[in-house]
Image (cartoon, helix red, strand yellow):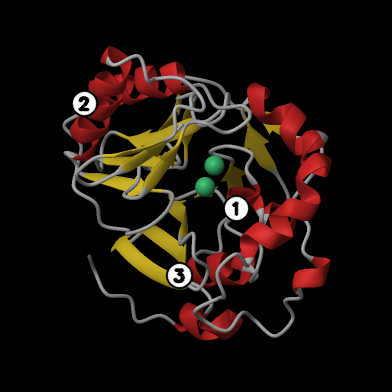
Amino acid sequence: MIPLTHPASALENNWFTVDALDDSTFGISEYGQWMKVHSYLFVGTERAILVDSGLGVGNIRTIVEELTKLPVDVITSHAHWDHTGGHHLFDRFSAHILERDWIESSWQRYTKDIGNWLVKEPFSQEPPPQFEIKKYMPFHAKVDRLHRDGDVLDLGGRKLEIIHTPGHSPGHVCIHEEERGYLATADLLYKGVLLGGLKFSDPEDFHRSLLRLREFFPIGKLLPGHGRLNIENDLLDEAIEAFGRLAKKGLLKKESGLHEFDRLKIQL
Ligand SMILES: [Zn+2]
Ligand SMILES: [Zn+2]
């Protein structure tokens, strides 16, 4: 990873950590909150794509504008509040049709719990001074545009493909860049506790989506949605094997509990 000496990190009270994965691809991480969320910025010659916008604790747009002056489109990996917190700072965003209801209306049912969840563990870094937990609200808005499986986004000089990967949530997508070998997996794959037992999760879809990601291998680098930024590519094999083992034992269903494996856990 190329160390980044960039003034962006001086903004927003150091809430964000920016890692340059190459000269035009950036991981934007929020290590100060226990979920350690990552968003990713892909910069082309004509426009840029921001995959997810983080927690909404700091202003991610100021960071993005330090990294590119091009127009930015936001892609929603899925509708959960920890990946859409900065969406309101941008002119437009897209989401999968199966996430639309969540973004436009279902968010209301979860508002109270989300603030508690955000600070379930104390922040390990000072949030920006303007942040107030009492005013914290999950993002909701009319979805501007829909994206779907197989869509190819041309940024000028580079292309990203949308892969529909339901399981964690119904309209969850991963983002693949064949030429540079990036695969952004959001909440489908990271090092930590994979969540397949949430209200709209489907453990069997989760398994199928992981299997589908294999079609895109070999890849250069996985870009996870949480936890450590650098994860081993063969974590996918372990996840697939783990889901396979649960299926064999008849445990691949909701409320079967927390299952522990070598490098990851699965909560169903
Ligand atoms: Zn999620
Ligand atoms: Zn998440």
Image coordinates of residue 174 in percent, x first then y, are: 43, 34
Q: Is mark 1 within 8 Å of ligand 2?
A: yes
**Residue underneath mark 1:** 82
Please name whichever residue, 150 or 30, is drawn nearer the observer in this view of the structure.
Answer: 30
Which mark identifies residue 70?
A: none
Q: Is residue 172 left or right of residue 190?
A: right
Q: Is residue 144 visible?
A: no
Q: Count the marks.
A: 3
**Residue underneath mark 2:** 241
**Dot 3 or dot 1, earlier in sequence:** 3
Give how far apart the Cα atoms at labels 3 and 1 are: 13 Å
Amino acid found under the numbered disc labelled 1 = Asp
Q: Quadrant of residue 236?
A: top left
Image coordinates of residue 109 in percent, x first then y, are: 81, 40
Placement of 52 over or under 257, stated as above or below: below
Placement of 23 over or under 10, stated as above or below: above
Secondary structure, mark 2, is: helix
Image coordinates of residue 92 in percent, x first then y, are: 71, 45
**Residue underneath mark 3:** 31
Residues at marks 1 and 2 touching, judged by CB atoms closer than 8 Å: no
Give how far apart the Cα atoms at labels 2 and 3 are: 29 Å
x 79%, y 45%: residue: 140
x 64%, y 36%: residue: 94
Placement of 11 over or under 22, stated as above or below: below
x 55%, y 76%: residue: 123
Few, some or many residues within 10 Å of mark 1 (<14, 14–19, 20+): many
Q: Is residue 259 left or right of residue 124?
A: left
Please name whichever residue, 29 or 80, is drawn nearer the observer in this view of the structure.
Answer: 80
Placement of 81 over or under 177, stated as above or below: below
